[in-house]
Image (cartoon, rainbow, N blue to C red):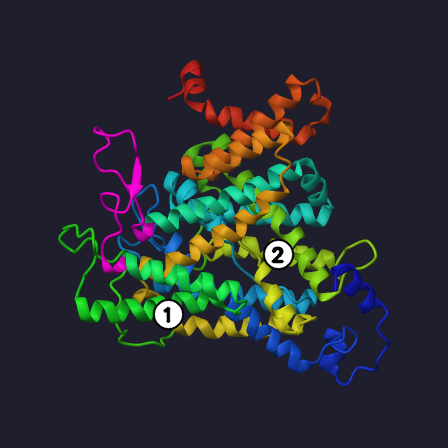
């Protein structure tokens, strides 16, 4: 049944009397659901998206800021600290979505957004400054939602560029996963070859850790094509168990030991081992570690504004598409294709972005994996509350992330990259006016290792092509402004030299 048909079926469903106060608040019977289905749907959504508790620490918890510090201010990664805060914010904001918007939509740290924060923003400033930008971005989106301007901004960017941004981020994430797993490696002898990266070691995959990655990736792929719910999480857990067994037998050790010795066949990030304790009181020490305006002092006004705008773009469009897709699957859309409580959904999502920055775990956003819960029968916010409670309980399991090596977790990044890549078919590749800017956006994100560069190049190319073809009037005024800002961003060094600014 199509989304439109389900929506019609929902509107024509006979009126039934609520059976309890819970039923009346969440409109469970009215939407054709039951408490049992909502609980089952909440569990399904949690197990489908809970991989983020492992992947977010893997991405933002292992990157140094411009001062050489890891998230939390230490000189070594504290993955349990990041995992606990990740699960906490996801739990609180998902419960808010269920209680305030009554919608079966779950939220957590956005993949792609966290990579941008880690590799493009924090590398230019402190982690506190970077998270302050995330808070600002969330507050700006909230203002845009409350004023109704969000839809206007959404309309300013051509659909092809919106898709290209998502696809480019997917390739960027997949590239990170392949590099961290050791499948793709930096070429140490760049003087003898023009190839900056290569396949494995000397063109071969070597070492037990890489084998664990390959097995984990194939396992996730098989489970996904067989429509097994929670395939990504199951794959991470299974690969971690395999890694623990392999390490216990082969005693491989880390890729870089405490003395700085390099073992190209060693484990990345963590050496897998049976943990001393599985459950522990969560440490929420990351909460509140942000500097709202510190980035402007650190990198200058133009760069800070562009970083914030790029964050906004990457975060801005997903929710509108996600909430509509979930509503279509659940048969909750009205005649105009809008879900119920649209304004509340967008408000909660905007607050989640700011909350993610305030808790130093990057912007939180709506997850399309919520469709797993809808597939199990979820139709109301009660399912989201169940999912949120499970995230809160997961904060006590944060120590487990410290036994997961790169090779066990990065298969998920490759698979997520694929899921984001499939949207590329919606770009009209025979229309060069949009195809060329989309192409530049997509390829420059992984090749330049910068989401900002990809978006900037795409926007500038789009504006230039339209102007060259005498169609400047078709470009939204906001896009002209953004393109001009990106020109300044790319040319900031010669501009500073011209103005005599050091």
Which residues are the magenta region? 180-209
Q: Is residue 271 above or below residue 63?
A: below
Mark 2 element type: helix
Residue 126 in the image, given as x and y percentages of width and height? 38, 44
Q: Nearer the viewer, mark 1 or mark 2?
A: 1
> How much space separates mark 1 and mark 2, taking CA atoms?
32 Å
Q: Is residue 96 above or below residue 446?
A: below
Q: Is residue 255 above or below residue 296?
A: below
For the point 52% across and 63% down, which residue is it?
A: 225
Q: Is residue 428 left or right of residue 232?
A: right
Q: Name the image quarter holding the N terminus.
A: bottom right
Q: Is residue 303 left or right of residue 34?
A: left
Residue 329 in the image, given as x and y percentages of width and height? 69, 63
Kindly tell me whether residue 360 is visible in this rendering: no
Task: State the residue lying farthest toward the top.
Answer: 498
Q: Which mark is residue 238?
A: 1
Mark 1 element type: helix
Q: Is residue 88 magenta?
A: no
Nearer to us in this view, 274 or 365: 274
For the point 56% across and 49% down, which residue is it?
A: 422
Q: Earlier in the sequence, mark 1 or mark 2?
A: 1
Q: Is residue 254 above or below residue 118?
A: below
Q: Name the image quarter holding the C terminus.
A: top left
Q: Which mark is residue 168?
A: none
Residue under numbered circle 2: 349
Residue 429 in the image, given as x and y percentages of width and height? 61, 34
Labels in figure, total: 2
For the point 33% across and 51% down, which residue is it?
A: 180
């Amino acid at each position: 049944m199509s989304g439109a048909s389900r929506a019609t079926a929902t509107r024509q469903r006979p009126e039934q009397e609520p059976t309890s106060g819970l039923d009346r608040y969440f409109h469970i019977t009215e939407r054709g659901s039951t408490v049992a289905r909502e609980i089952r749907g909440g569990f399904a959504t949690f197990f489908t998206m809970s991989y983020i508790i492992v992947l977010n620490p893997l991405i933002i918890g292992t990157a140094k800021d411009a001062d050489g510090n890891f998230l939390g201010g230490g000189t070594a990664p504290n993955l349990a600290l990041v995992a606990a805060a990740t699960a906490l914010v996801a739990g609180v904001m998902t419960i808010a979505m269920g209680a305030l918007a009554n919608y079966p939509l779950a939220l957590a740290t956005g993949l792609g957004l966290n990579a941008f924060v880690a590799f493009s923003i924090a590398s230019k400033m402190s982690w506190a400054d970077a998270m302050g930008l995330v808070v600002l971005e969330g507050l700006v989106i909230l203002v845009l939602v409350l004023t109704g301007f969000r839809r206007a901004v959404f309309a300013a960017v051509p659909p092809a560029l919106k898709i290209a941004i998502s696809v480019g981020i997917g390739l960027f994430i997949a590239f990170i996963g392949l590099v961290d797993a050791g499948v793709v490696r930096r070429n140490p002898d760049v003087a003898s070859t023009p190839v900056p990266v290569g396949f494995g070691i000397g063109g071969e995959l070597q070492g037990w850790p890489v084998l664990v990655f390959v097995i984990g990736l194939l396992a996730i792929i098989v489970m996904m094509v067989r429509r097994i719910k929670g395939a990504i999480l199951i794959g991470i857990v299974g690969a971690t168990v395999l890694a623990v067994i392999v390490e216990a037998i082969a005693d491989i050790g880390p890729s870089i030991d405490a003395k700085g010795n390099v073992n190209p066949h060693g484990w990345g990030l963590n050496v897998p081992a049976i943990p001393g304790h599985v459950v522990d009181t969560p440490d929420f020490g990351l909460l509140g570690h942000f500097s709202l305006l510190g980035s402007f002092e650190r990198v200058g006004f133009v760069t800070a504004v562009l970083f914030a705008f790029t964050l906004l773009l990457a975060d801005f469009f997903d929710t509108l598409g996600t909430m509509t897709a979930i509503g279509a699957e659940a048969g909750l859309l009205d005649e105009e294709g809008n879900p119920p409580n649209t304004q509340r959904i967008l408000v909660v999502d905007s607050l989640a972005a700011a909350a993610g920055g305030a808790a130093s775990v990057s912007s939180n956003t709506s997850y399309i994996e919520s469709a797993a819960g809808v597939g199990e029968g979820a139709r109301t916010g009660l399912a989201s509350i169940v999912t949120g409670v499970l995230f809160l309980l997961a904060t006590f399991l944060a120590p487990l992330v410290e036994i997961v090596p790169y090779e066990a977790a990065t298969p998920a990044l490759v698979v997520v990259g694929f899921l984001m890549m499939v949207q590329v078919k919606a770009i009209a590749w025979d229309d060069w006016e949009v195809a060329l800017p989309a192409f530049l956006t997509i390829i420059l994100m992984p090749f330049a290792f910068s989401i900002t560069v990809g978006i900037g190049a795409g926007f500038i190319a789009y504006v230039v092509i339209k102007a060259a073809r005498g169609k400047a009037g078709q470009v939204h005024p906001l896009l002209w402004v953004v393109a001009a800002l990106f020109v300044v961003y790319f040319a900031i060094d010669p501009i500073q030299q011209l103005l005599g600014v050091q």
